[in-house]
Amino acid sequence: MKLSAALRISDGEIVAFVGGGGKTTAMFRLAEEIVEAGGRVITTTTTRIFAAQVSLAPKHFSAFEVNRAAVEAALDKHHHVLITGPVDVEAGKAAGVTPGLVRDLLAIPDVAAILIEADGSRMRPFKAPAEHEPVIPNVTTLVVPVVGVDVFGQPLNDQRVHRVELVCALTGAAEGEPVTPKLVARVTGHPQGGLKGVPAGVRVIPLINKAEASEELDAARETADRLLGNPNISSVVIGAVKHGVNPAREAHGRVAAIVLAAGRSTRMGRSKQTLPWGDTTMIGEVVRRLQASRVAEIVVVTGAEKESVEAALAAAPVRFAFNPDFETSEMARSLQVGLRSLPLSGNFLAALVVLADQPRFDPGVAQAVIQRWRETQAPVVAPIYQGQRGHPLLFDRSTWPDLFALPAEANPRDFLRAAGRIELVEAVTDAILRDIDTPDDYERERRA
């Protein structure tokens, strides 16, 4: 997966990289991707970078020599321009520019992104910022705190960590103890750590870099899980930006589950959602299994049996959303109602659509669907068994405007038929296909 896709870079983005563990490499890798896609990009720094890194851009300007016409001409020719302060050859450093200059660069037309290295780490994979840093311009739209996985399991000392004393102060950790995912997540998500200096309302997407071996990936995933417990973190990218065609391995974001339970159960002849199932009800069993899928939020969309469904789930950690059009609409309207009920503060990046009449819902299938989405950021991910597509379906946030545009009588299948890319995940059983519509279905499934 491209880094630009994992970070969800949009046109006109202003990205500040902070932290340690390869932020300069990440910045230039992202610039390469933008140029490859036909865009024009400016890279810069508000701190200092090594003078040798100036050659990573096809054209370099000193801020004291730069003028708009020259930059525009260079962008026309090279598509990528690096702007720094003066280069001190003897010290081997290029100085940073002011936040004011970054704001001035916004006036240059047709620039897909401005990428900024906003602090230093002295080549360490992990750090805490000093009082004077980072220097993040207030026009920034995305902040990417970077950490290298090579710090995990290492002693908390000056050899691996920049400003150990500040890390200890932020976390209560003792110098010399092993660096864990918990410690990294605490610093990265701390207001005086990875979130320091982030303008209000700006997206924050940490990049856990250099994750290649399986044990490194495990530590990175645990860190991502912990970071997503912080509402100020939009998502987390795991990758290895220095190697491979696709530098982003996974993009972890919050997934909400929408349970469609608004149907009238006409073929069953009575409310099927609240029929007994083991020690609970059908809807209770679906929700219980869904909890094992570790989704961030569960929304149950009710309709004909609003009161009985809510009573059956009174003790469950779910949010209810009522579809007032349940008598005249199809599943698409219930999905729209469920999506609109999600709290804006949740930063949800995908929705898992679950049927209330599939009590043999497999949490393992849901986790496999979510994992495939993490690896691909595909618009739609669906399980398949022997060539037949089933549920749950996952819809990336990028598809939601199209879902909202569906008419009330539409079915999500209408959108699937029109979707450009559907990523399929093989299921090992036919549970993804087995829903309960009739009394015979119900008796058969109970005996299964």
Image (tube, rainbow, N blue to C red):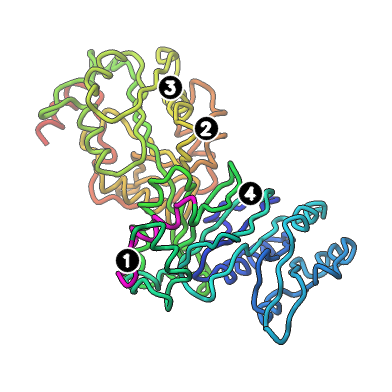
N-terminal label among 4 and 3: 4
Q: Does the magenta stretch include residue 181?
A: yes
How packed mark 1 is, by other alpha carbons closer than 10 Å (few <14, some 14-19, many 20 or more), is some
Q: Where is residue 439 in the image (x, y as percent from the top left)?
A: 18, 21
Residue at the right extreme? Answer: 69
- Which numbered circle lies on residue 141? 4
Please state which amino acid type lies under the numbered disc 3: Glu
**CA separation in Å, label 2 and label 1:** 50 Å
Camera-near label (3 vs 1) is 1
Query: Comparing marks 2 and 1, which lies closer to the viewer?
Result: 1
Q: Where is residue 262 in the image (x, y as percent from the top left)?
A: 35, 20
> In the image, what residue occupies the spot 58% across and 58% down?
4
**For the residue carrying disc 2, how many other residues have a C-alpha within 10 Å: few (<14), some (14-19), or many (20+)?**
many
Image quarter where the C terminus lies is top left
According to the picture, the residue beneath numbered tag 2 turns out to be 403
| Image quadrant assignment for residue 284 | top left
The mark lying in front, picked from 1 and 4, is 1
Residue 330: numbered disc? 3
Label 4 environment density (alpha carbons within 10 Å; few <14, some 14–19, many ≥20): many
Residue located at (26% from left, 28% from top): 357
User: In the image, residue 283 lies at what x, y percent?
Assistant: 24, 27
Residue interval drawn in magenta: 173-191
Pick whichever, 135 or 233, lies toward us.
135
Mark 1 or mark 2, which is nearer the start of the sequence? 1
Query: Which of label 4 and label 3 is nearer to you?
Result: 4
Question: Residue 253 placed where, x, y %?
Answer: 44, 48
Report the side of 412 relative to 402 (left or right). Answer: left
Cα separation, mark 2 vs mark 4, equals: 26 Å
- Identify residue type, mark 2: Leu
Residue behind mark 1: 174
